[in-house]
Amino acid sequence: MKKYTPSPILTAGLETFLEAGNPTLDLLRVQPGIPIDDAYEHVSVLLGYIKHLVREGDMEDDHKLLGSADYLLAMAKALMNDIELARNKLH
């Protein structure tokens, strides 16, 4: 008897982040077709880095660290939003 293996849910590739220009245009986009388990793993790593940058930036009053955290946060948010779009497509 053949065992059924469901296809992995893949990122939708719809979410963008980092606006540039005037009028503003989205500079970067989440790549479509990435298994969401892999994307979740990267979000987890990003959030760990963001937490560290915010703590260090706050303690040292270092605006470069805080600015870096802001960029990474935009990336993590776009990944999470794209994962949710992909998951909701199936339901």
Image (cartoon, rainbow, N blue to C red):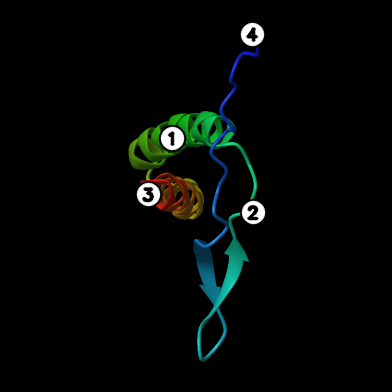
Q: Nearer the viewer, mark 3 or mark 1?
A: 3
Q: Are marks 3 and 2 in contact (CB under 8 Å)?
A: no
Residue nearer the viewer, 91 or 55: 91
Element type where label 2 sits in the image: loop
Q: Amino acid at mark 2?
A: Gln
Residue behind mark 2: 31
Is 75 drawn above or below residue 50 in the view shown? below
Alpha carbon separation for disc pair 2 and 4 = 36 Å
Q: Nearer the viewer, mark 2 or mark 1?
A: 2
Residue behind mark 3: 88
Q: Nearer the viewer, mark 3 or mark 4?
A: 4
Alpha carbon separation for disc pair 3 and 4 = 31 Å
Q: Residue at x 58, y 20 (%)?
A: 4
Q: Amino acid at mark 4?
A: Met
Alpha carbon separation for disc pair 3 and 1 = 23 Å
Residue behind mark 4: 1
Where residue 48 appears, as percent x and y from the top left, is 45, 29
Q: Are marks 2 and 4 in contact (CB under 8 Å)?
A: no
Nearest to N terminus: mark 3 or mark 2: 2
Nearest to N terminus: mark 3 or mark 4: 4
Nearest to N terminus: mark 2 or mark 4: 4
Alpha carbon separation for disc pair 1 and 4 = 43 Å
Element type where label 4 sits in the image: loop
Element type where label 1 sits in the image: helix
